[in-house]
Image (cartoon, rainbow, N blue to C red):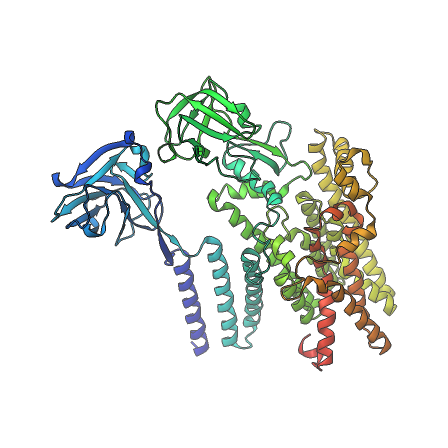
Amino acid sequence: MKKKQWKVLFLIFITFLLILLLGPMDVFRHGYYCDVVEYDEISSEDRLGYADLQNGAYELKFSPVKKYFTGFEINLINQPKGNKGKLKFSIYNSNGKQVDEIRADLKQISATKWYKLYANKTLKKGEIYTLKISAEECATVPYLQLVDSDCLGKENISGNVLLGYAYAESTFDFQNKILIIMFLIALCGLICVRILDHNKHAIIVGRVAVFVLLTSVLTWNFMYNSMDNDNNDFEDFQSDSESLVTAVLAADHAHVGLREGELGYGLGVHYYNIKDNFHDKENLKSDENWNNGYSCSSVSICIDSNIYTKQIAMVGNSVQFANGSMFQIINVSDDGDCISIDLNAERMLTESKYGELTEVIFYDQNMVQLPNGILTAYPSQYGLQGKIFKHLARHMEYEGAAENLKLICSMAAAVVFVLIVFLLSKRYNRVLGGVFFVTFLLSPWIVNFASNLYWVEFTWFLPMVIGLFCAWKVDNKYCRIFSYVAAFVAVTVKCLCGYEYITSVMMGLILFLLSDFVMACIKGDRKQQFLLFRTIFILGILALAGFITAICIHAPLRGNGSIAKGIKSIFIDDVLRRTTGADLNHYTEDYVVALGASVWETVCKYFHFNTQIITGIDGNLFPLLCIIPVLIFIIGLRRKSLDFEFVALYIVTFLTSVSWFVLAKSHSYVHTHINFVLWYMGYVQVCLYVIVDWIIDRIGVRREYYE
């Protein structure tokens, strides 16, 4: 075997080993995390005495509920300061074999204070172990506090010693691991290509590696915003819109479906439970009288007052807590913000014993379990993304489902953007592809939208990929047919996920073909003119067909089974409200102002950026960014060196971006907090490209070096 091949095999082995350590073996761990109850928060009724270790070792059974068990926390009584001696914790597996032994110096332990004990072995999740606690050579033998089992962790199987169980956490979360593994694979591929030099297989590997590398870089930035410290809106961007999806995920996890008459929609505008409307995400009441919804002075709990809780908080109904205890409601008081519920329990309730209130279950007077919440539909969209994400989330752990879905959105956007970059590099040149990549990477607007579960940004740009591919292979009949079918599917999917920006999305489908058509007209190539015109026309018809198909799928939901009534409702309530021509008597004052605004006034709003254009370029420079290419065109025209293809791209991308500002004027007038993203449907990139190309030409870099 050749030396180069040995190097490649060794590199692949090292990469595989790193992936194994990072993924399945998960050797990178950190921390000591233990959820314990403070001693003084345990009521006297729940303290069941103590275990005197002078009488011998105390034995209990437990089973770790998480991976990476890392130790215990112990709480002692009868433990004087400076006490001498040792505590020994011996752990045995189900076969009676000792697997670990931990010793603690009593000098280091204070009475009724939690003390951390570090295990020497990592115990397996779900396995049953026996723990024996004994004292050795003690001046004063300490006691172990015994408590009610409700005050103990889920790990406890037998025994009542007040004990905490600690775990380490993986240093890298699932999303980190996926992206790091992608980067490692791409890096390995690039190095292998370098080793193999011009081998024909190496060229293919190299292209795949570059694709994966660019995808991982974009995805990382979409997830973590690593390139822009000034992008302060990143974490909370459009949380209200995203909650239309996360509300569905939360409701589905709680086995709550849409109300009767709203079935079929994929998005939920409100998810009400005992906590609050899902949008607000506020904690349960906590002040001097309440602790996370539990009363500090009476046998009462406090939940939010909303349309759901008003139905379940009724005298005679019962409440079952997380620990299994159940009490009947004897009195209800509603102040409009909170509902106070008095229960027939014999003593006060505490979170440490009865669990979080979000886990309670209500039963009616016949002991029939009541729903866990109410989910109301968002009727303005069909909500395909909500339907898909809900089914995907069912196969994930709920706590990490939203982040995993954001990773999917971010990666899908990155793949679409890299496809655009590759196709531009093939159809035009690498400089244009590079400018698009940098803009996608550094635009605060692209970054903010990319991971959002409602906006699913990749669906906006997928038609652009299809149109660009068609422009590249327009002379190939089969490629055109493929593009026609793909365009119909892509536009249908986009509309089923939301109608916003649809004019710009459809223009994005044909913008490069339009530019080519302009160039064919300038060159007088009638054959190419006819081919491009026919292609653009068919794509436009199929895009329109995709839009109509989505409307016809959505309309029966809006019209209670009637497509005609549904289309009428969508047209009056959604289309006219976002465009013009509506009867102002049917709308609130906010919409009246937007509907009455001029197109000129609306478009002018979008020349005043409130963010950076891309990282490092201030938003105040946007008008200048628009004007400089025009000046370059004028100079080129005077010198008879004007590239009309640049002019065509500039005009067509401008029209693509402003089409929504114009046709959806009312929407654009009031949605300046989101609609600036439309400038990145090609216009900002082309402006930057014209400037970069002019600079390259001025410094004398020959075209063949970057084409």
Residue at x-position 50% and y-position 25%: 370
Q: As rendered, which of 181 and 133 lies closer to the eye?
A: 133
Q: In this view, does 645 lie to the left or right of 377?
A: right
Along the horizontal axis of the image, is 167 left or right of 679? left
Residue 458: x %, y % from top left: 64, 53
Residue drawn at point x = 18 percent, y = 48 percent: 87
Q: Where is residue 396 in the image (x, y as percent from the top left)?
A: 48, 44
**x and y percentages locating residue 355 in the rendered image:** 39, 34
- In the rendered structure, the answer to whether residue 597 lies left or right of residue 250 reads right
Q: Nearer the viewer, residue 190 or 682?
A: 682
Q: As displayed, is residue 648 above or below residue 262?
A: below
Q: Which residue is drawn at 35% across and 44% down?
A: 35
Quadrant where the C terminus is found in the figure = bottom right
Tag count: 0
The residue shown at (57%, 57%) is 222
- Residue 429 appears in view: yes
Q: Which residue lies furthest to the bottom in this view?
A: 700
Residue 392 % position (x, y)? 53, 44
> Can residue 473 be seen by looking at this rendering?
no
Closer to us: 124 or 159: 159
